[in-house]
Image (cartoon, grey):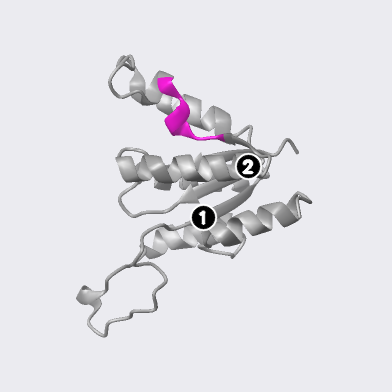
Amino acid sequence: MNNRIYLGGGLLDLGDQMRRQFERDDLKRLDFKVHSPQDDESINDKVNADQEHLAERIVANDINVMCKSDVLIFDYLPHNQGTIAEMGYIQGLMHSGYECKVYVQCTDIRQGTGHVNREQDRAEFSINQYVYGVILDITNGRGIQTWEEITQDLMKSYGKY
């Protein structure tokens, strides 16, 4: 294992960018090699990136790094379509024999509060059940974890305690 981690999640608004930067820095502090797609200026410098075949280059760059990583960490948020697509892609690879460890967190502050409303249309947070099934599959049933749970498990798995 090369201790390489792919950090997937939203990166299109300032809050998401700051969150990915915090996660990247936290993992580097723990001595992991981290790839965050937002750091790939060839595709994610939204002001200066070459727009020709950009979609194809984004997919190629991200898949290339995901497939070279031992660990993938995704931040599931319902509006982050790219992250959801990446989780589905990895699920397909894993069903074809690809081996990696996957963690999924959800940084939506409404998730996991236990607030369940009797009126379904008033639920403050919900995960699409197909997507949740994918999350359960790629995490070997662990489902969604907190950042602290993920980093503690990584440290334990890699003997960094």
Q: Which stretch appears magenta?
A: 35-41
Residue bearing the label numbered 2: 29
Residue bearing the label numbered 1: 104
Element marked by disc 2:
helix
Quarter of the figure with residue 45: top left
Numbered tag placed on residue 84 in the rendering: none
Quarter of the figure with residue 54: top left
Residue 111 rendering spot, x and y as whole percentages: 38, 67
User: Which residue does the image show at 61% across and 46% down from the upper left?
Assistant: 94
User: Which residue does the image show at 57% across and 45% down from the upper left?
Assistant: 26
Residue 63 rendering spot, x and y as whole percentages: 52, 31
Q: Is residue 43 above or below residue 133?
A: above
Q: Earlier in the sequence, mark 2 or mark 1?
A: 2
- Mark yes or no: residue 9 visible: no
| Kind of residue at disc 2 | Arg
Name the foreground residue: 13 vs 83. 13
User: Which residue does the image show at 49% across and 25% down from the upper left?
Assistant: 61
Using residue 7 as the reference point, say whether residue 12 is left or right of it. Answer: left
Magenta-drawn stretch contains 36: yes
Magenta-drawn stretch contains 20: no
User: Which residue does the image show at 67% across and 52% down from the upper left?
Assistant: 154
| Kind of residue at disc 1 | Val
